[in-house]
Amino acid sequence: MTDSVTNLRALAPPPELRRPKLAPGERGLGGLTDHLTAFAEGRTPRWWWILFLPAAFFAAVVLPSMLIYQISTGVGVWGNNEPVAWGWDIINFVWWVGVAHAGTLISAMLFLTRQHWRTAIGRAAEAMTVFAVMMAGLYPAIHTGRIWFDWFLAPVPTANGIWPQFRSPLMWDVFAVNTYLMVSTLFWYVGLIPDLALMRDRAKTRMRKFLYGLFALGWTGSARHWHNYEKAYLVLSGLATLLVFTVSSVVGMDFATSQLAGWHETIFPFYFVAGAVFCGFGMVLVLLIPLRKLCHLEDVITLRHIDKVCKMTLLMGCVMGYIYVMEYFIAWYAGNPYDAWVFGHRLFGHQYWYGGWIMILVNASLPQLFWFKRVRQNLKLIFLIAVLINIGMWFERSVIIVGALYQDFLPANWGVYFPTWVDLGTYAGTLGAFFTMYLLFVRFLPVIAVSEVKGMMPQANPYHPLGGAKGDH
Amino acid sequence: MDANGKIYGLVAEFDSPAAILRAAEKVRDAGYRRWDTFTPFPVHGLDKVMGFKNSLVGWFALVFGGGAFVGCMAMIWYMNDFDYPIIVGGKPMFSPPAAFVPSYILLVLAGAIGAFVGMIALNELPRHHHPLFKNRRFELATRDKFFLVIGATDPKFSETETRKLLAEAGGTHIELVEDD
């Protein structure tokens, strides 16, 4: 054993070239397990209540009141009208779908590309995906107005004998969003099973043992189970990766297949995927930076993880910049006067001009700060940039939707759009519901994929001296 | 154990992934067939020692997903061409490219459900009562200990010989596990 340890030391790079570790190896497997489950098992800290109570108020009081009022009265209580028939409902829908995307990208795509740093943040990002898709799915369901007719969207024999029309991207969207919700929930749950078993085995009270045990499905950690489990996780990752490219592209096609200037663009499916991933990385940073501090996980979600997420955000920010430039280029090069009108007014119109500037300055320019390592190490600044990215991406959707609708082909038809208090209340309610669910997740489930993090430690490698190897393998 | 209780097997505890891997090799070489290992995370190399073939979960996903793709294509043809033709923009009543998107989405959905169902079915879960759950130390199998269980139904199983083998392989806390 001593021989192999000395050999390893001789092969290791000099101290100045060593990267910070991705997992705290010095704790050992047991110590790390205690550390990662400590928050879900400990007492509820005061900050949790301070965040939870307002969020729960918006989720349990504001959101239901807004929904009851809107459903019983009609969509007229929103600011939507002609010519701007899609307002905050669809802006927020696209925004929430976008927020969801980074979770799938981190957990599925980075799993397939064997990026080990994802293990520490994958679970938290997947939870974000599940809850954000729930919020996203709410909007299309309620924006139909008479929600009791939503079942017309399902391919079932309807009372009037007409089937759904499958050439419409709006129909594809119904499939895409529901699939996204189900697949991301399934992916999250499958990842949780071994950790639920861990929580069951550690539980001190009967209630906890029963509940964790119920959802752990009787997981034992048998090698046969792991064998099928790893295959299932791989297949699910592959399928979820396909969804990263499908969901927002279908949302983009809702717009692109119309005839409207500002929407009728072939770049839209890609545009929406890139924007979604970008916005999602912003939300990941907004959630992770406080989470790692409040739950004392600084040595698991390290600065190196944050650094990597910042780099991904920078990459997506550059893609956004490219798309913005390309949109303007096509608007000019295509020579369509309506396109030129919409894109000119996006920045220099007398109404909503600020949205266009926010979108360019925040989404394409601000992330360029992440080129500097000093910015990528400054948590307060990263948090601020991440919040601004989420706001900027909200404005981008607003520019696309309202900006293309308020001045259509017929000047006599032009109008302006402003949200009402019901729009605002509904959005605040969905934010509250999202954070309520997220805080419950943080409180009761392990926010770090414990078995995955343990599995990538040297102590878990049977061919590593720390894993007990004696040089005979 | 009580007089008429059946034996499930012998369980031994190990401290490191390398130790359980070595023990698994020993147990395999001794000719045992009905045995299993329990680890807090997948230990790579164990599947080879235990002689697992490629998992069937992928086939579940393929059959579910492929079935959904074909089924959705057929459904769209039936609904929009056969049962109630709808003319949209003068295009053909049914064309595969337009029907591809929802079919592809359903492929992903059904494939994911297939992978999940396959994993659950092949692992014979949910199973909330397992003989090993009665063993106090087995709670550590999800934490930092590694367990090897040799089943009493194994033709080579003998309480004394098997216990000796597990002790030689470095196992500690070797205990009998009762069956339900």
Image (cartoon, coloured by chain):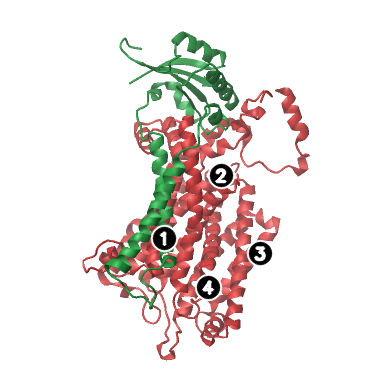
3D distance between C-alphas at marks 1 and 4: 19 Å
Kind of residue sitting beneath label 1: Ala
Q: Position of residue A448 (x, y in %)?
A: 51, 42
Task: Looking at the picture, tell me which residue is in the foreground, A97 or A255.
Answer: A255
Q: Where is residue A441 in the image (x, y as percent from the top left)?
A: 43, 46
Between marks 3 and 1 in the image, the one whose residue lies nearer the viewer: 1
Which residue is drawn at the image coordinates 76% and 39% (left, top)?
A: A13
Q: Chain A is drawn in which colour?
A: red
Task: Looking at the picture, tell me which residue is in the foreground, A43 or A314.
Answer: A314
3D distance between C-alphas at marks 4 and 3: 27 Å
Task: Looking at the picture, tell me which residue is in the foreground, A398 or A452.
Answer: A452
Relative to A398, does residue A217 appear above or below in the rendering? above
Relative to A413, does residue A298 appear above or below in the rendering? above
Res A435 seen here? no
| Discs 3, 1 touching: Cβ within 8 Å | no
Return the residue at label 2. A120
Q: Are the residues under badges 2 and 4 in a single subunit? A: yes
Q: Are the residues under badges 3 and 1 in a single subunit? A: yes
Numbered tag placed on residue A368 in the rendering = 3
Give the mark count: 4
Q: Which of marks 3 and 2 is nearer the N terminus?
A: 2
Q: Tell which subunit mark 1 falls on.
A: A
Return the residue at label 4. A266
